[in-house]
Image (cartoon, rainbow, N blue to C red):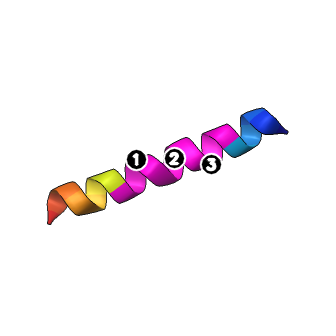
């Protein structure tokens, strides 16, 4: 279960980072 949460957090981080970087 922890691995799943880590993946979700990492994915969300990448998405947020990409969105902020785009701006």
Image vertical order of residue 21 relative to residue 10, above or below = below
Across and down, in percent, residue 2 comes to 79, 37
Label 1 to label 3: alpha-carbon separation: 10 Å
For disc 2, the marked residue is 11
Q: Is residue 2 left or right of residue 19?
A: right
Label 1 sits on a secondary structure element that is helix
Across and down, in percent, residue 1 comes to 85, 39
Label 2 sits on a secondary structure element that is helix
For disc 3, the marked residue is 8
Label 2, residues with CA under 10 Å away: few <14, some 14-19, many ≥20: few
For disc 1, the marked residue is 14
Across and down, in percent, residue 22 comes to 17, 60
CB of mark 2 within 8 Å of CB of mark 3?
A: yes
| Residue bounds of the magenta highlight | 6-16
Label 3 sits on a secondary structure element that is helix
Q: Is residue 4 magenta?
A: no
Q: Residue at x 62, y 48 (%)?
A: 8
Res 20 quadrant in image: bottom left
Overall secondary structure of the magenta section: helix
Label 1, residues with CA under 10 Å away: few <14, some 14-19, many ≥20: few
Q: Residue at x 51, y 47 (%)?
A: 11
Label 3, residues with CA under 10 Å away: few <14, some 14-19, many ≥20: few
Q: Residue at x 58, y 48 (%)?
A: 9
């Amino acid at each position: 279960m922890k691995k799943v949460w880590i993946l979700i957090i990492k994915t969300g981080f990448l998405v947020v980072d990409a969105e902020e970087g785009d701006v």
